[in-house]
Image (cartoon, rainbow, N blue to C red):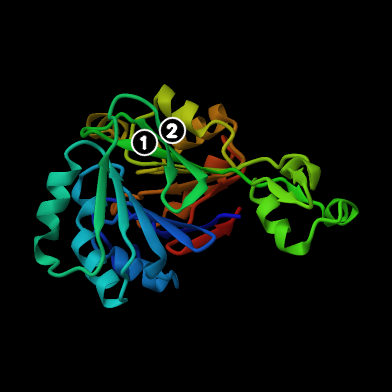
């Protein structure tokens, strides 16, 4: 399963009741954080997230409201005595930017490894420490090089203990077989398919902000269990400003969710000029029924 928390939902600047958009997910104790604007460590704390479990940071782009919280987050991880490495994935230019942001983070007890991802094509890689968790990045349409991410947990087939008992396989080998490794016992080779019952569908969520609607977004999000997408404004009132600055509104996000045939849509990255995004709930659900307008700390388990 994947535990997901949209710890912050705001865009541009934090408000007294809304932190900047940041998304945390966890699989088997391994935490992945997407973006870290100003005050991210506070948003995570208020959402009861154990930040010490973060081992991967995905950056969508290098506007301040998505990266300026990096030093504070690093110092919080230091204070929580994190010692395991932090892996950062980001658009090109990230190594220099993160190096500069880290100048006030002295003597971190953990190493930071930074990978710059291709800005012009889809790119797939395994989540560090979780080989069954695959991440795909894709370029978006914004005023800076910007990436969206699709995260997929490929689940193991269902283990059937009765099959293992019939084959007289000792209990200590069951977990080994379930994780896909062959076992040799009593002169025989046993394989995973001998003790499991078929495949299970993967679990997938897609996160995209900031971007204009585009074909890459639809392809990346296709049939996601959960689609978290920017909705800067609730309607078309500021559409020219959106186009100029490379953002999407609620209608854009709902249309993308519909085209991509996702199961559920969460909107995020709300403009500070939109203090009450929830008034658009009924109108946006006419486009895509299963739409949520989350508040900070909104959670779900896939």
Which of 3 and 198 lies nearest the eye of the viewer? 198
For disc 2, the neighbor class at 10 Å (few under 14, some 14 to 19, many from 20) is: many
Q: Is residue 11 left or right of residue 157?
A: left
Q: Are marks 1 and 2 in contact (CB under 8 Å)?
A: yes
Residue farthest to the top? 215
Q: Residue at x 26, y 51 (%)?
A: 113
SS for callout 2: helix
- Looking at the rendering, which quadrant does residue 81 occupy? bottom left
Which of 18 and 124 lies nearest the eye of the viewer? 124
Residue identifier under label 1: 248
Residue 175 location in percent, x, y?
Answer: 68, 57
Is residue 282 in view?
Answer: yes
For disc 1, the neighbor class at 10 Å (few under 14, some 14 to 19, many from 20) is: many
Q: Is residue 12 left or right of residue 23?
A: left
Q: Mark on residue 165?
A: none
The N terminus is located in which quarter? bottom right
Which of 187 and 265 lies nearest the eye of the viewer? 187
Residue identifier under label 2: 252
SS for callout 1: loop
């Amino acid at each position: 399963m994947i535990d997901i928390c949209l710890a912050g939902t705001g865009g541009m600047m934090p408000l007294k009741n809304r932190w900047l958009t940041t998304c945390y997910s966890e699989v088997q104790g391994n935490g992945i954080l997407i973006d870290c604007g100003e005050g991210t460590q506070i948003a995570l704390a208020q959402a009861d997230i154990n930040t010490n479990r973060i081992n991967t940071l995905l950056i969508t782009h290098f506007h301040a409201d998505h990266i300026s919280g990096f030093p504070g987050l690093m110092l919080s991880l230091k204070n929580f005595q994190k010692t395991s490495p932090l892996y950062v994935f980001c658009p090109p230019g990230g190594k220099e930017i993160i190096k500069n942001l880290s100048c006030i983070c002295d003597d971190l007890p953990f190493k930071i490894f930074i990978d710059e991802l291709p800005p012009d094509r889809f790119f797939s890689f395994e989540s560090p420490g979780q080989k069954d968790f695959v991440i795909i990045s894709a370029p978006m349409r914004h005023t800076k090089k910007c990436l969206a991410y699709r995260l997929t947990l490929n689940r193991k087939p269902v283990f059937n203990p009765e099959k293992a008992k019939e084959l007289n396989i000792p209990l200590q080998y069951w977990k080994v077989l379930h994780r896909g490794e062959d076992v040799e016992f009593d002169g025989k080779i046993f394989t995973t398919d001998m003790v499991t019952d078929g495949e299970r569908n993967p679990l997938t969520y897609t996160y995209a902000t900031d971007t204009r609607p585009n074909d890459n977004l639809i392809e990346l999000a296709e049939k996601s269990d959960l689609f978290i997408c920017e909705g800067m404004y609730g309607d078309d009132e500021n559409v020219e400003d959106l186009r100029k600055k490379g953002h999407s509104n609620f209608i854009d996000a709902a249309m993308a969710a519909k085209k991509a045939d996702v199961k559920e849509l969460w909107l995020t990255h709300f403009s500070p000029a939109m203090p009450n995004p929830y008034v658009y709930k009924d109108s946006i659900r006419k486009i895509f029924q299963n739409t949520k307008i989350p508040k900070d700390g909104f959670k779900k388990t896939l």
